[in-house]
Amino acid sequence: MSKLLFQGHGSLRFTLDDGRVIYLDPFSGRGYDLPADFVLITHQHFDHNKIKLIKQKPECVVITNENALVDGEYKVFEFDGLRIEATEAYNKNHEKDECVGYILEFDGLKTYCTGDTGVTEQMKTFADRRFDYAIFNTDDVFTIPLAESAAIAAVIGARHNVPIHTQPLNLFSREKVTRWRAPNRLIIWAGEEIDMQEENL
């Protein structure tokens, strides 16, 4: 059973069917108890890269913006049924050559995590990727504003659109997510874990 735990702010934990664990942008919330097989970092801002929170398995793979984006090339990594693809991420607060998002493919699911970004040109081409989940960092301050992220969510057309990073440095803003008008909106509260396959039926 594939699970997604939204820890809070921009921090996520994925647990695959086979028990492998992926952390993305560790910073806040709870749920750092499972040893990591993979740690993904979208950029080096302090609220996205607290790798020390995580106990890593001996074979743990750490992928950061620095090895996911090399000389302008967005890298793809494959590990026994898990595919990790780096994507564009940039805005006035985040340099294009210092930030990435990620597309994760595992257990028959395809999930896009935007990272801290504005609307990118690459996003506009994603409709044919047929994502099961698109997870938007959207806070009206440092990342995609609510209205813009809702509009690009409609273009991308994921089966489930999930808002996170809704208030800088805080776990979550209930007020903001209730105003988010994206189609197929799926609200995951900070500290909540979902069965990704059950939600996707």
Image (cartoon, grey):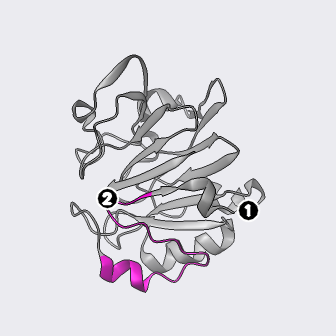
Q: Earlier in the sequence, mark 2 or mark 1?
A: 1
Q: CA distance from mark 2 to mark 1?
A: 30 Å
Q: Nearer the viewer, residue 62 or 23?
A: 23
Q: Which residue is mark 2?
A: 191
Quadrant, the N terminus = top right
Where residue 118 appears, as percent x and y from the top left, is: 47, 63
Kindly report the secondary structure that dominates the magenta region of the rendered protein.
loop
Residue kind at label 2, given as amino acid type: Gly
Residue at 28 percent of width and 37 percent of height: 33
Number of residues whose C-alpha sits closer than 10 Å to that of mark 1, classed few (under 14), some (14–19) or many (20 or more): some
Horizontal and vertical percent position of residue 180: 46, 81
Residue 10 lies in quadrant: bottom left
Q: Which residue is mark 1?
A: 127
| Above or below, 19 relative to 7 | above
- Residue 121 visible? The answer is no
Question: Image point 35% across, 62% down: which residue?
Answer: 165
Amino acid type at image mark 1: Ala
How many numbered marks are there?
A: 2
Q: Nearer the viewer, residue 26 or 90?
A: 26
Residue at the (59%, 42%) spot, across then down: 104
Helix, strand or loop at disc 1? helix
Residue 34, disc: none
Name the residue rendered at 59%, 51% in the picture: 111
Quick one: quadrant of the C terminus? bottom right
Q: Secondary structure at mark 2?
A: loop
Identify the magenta region: 174-193
Task: Answer whether residue 176 is magenta in the image.
Answer: yes
Residue 170 horizontal/vertical position (percent) = 22, 64
In contact (CB < 8 Å): disc 2 and disc 1: no
Question: Magenta stretch containing residue 167, yes or no?
Answer: no
The quarter of the displayed image where residue 85 is located: top right
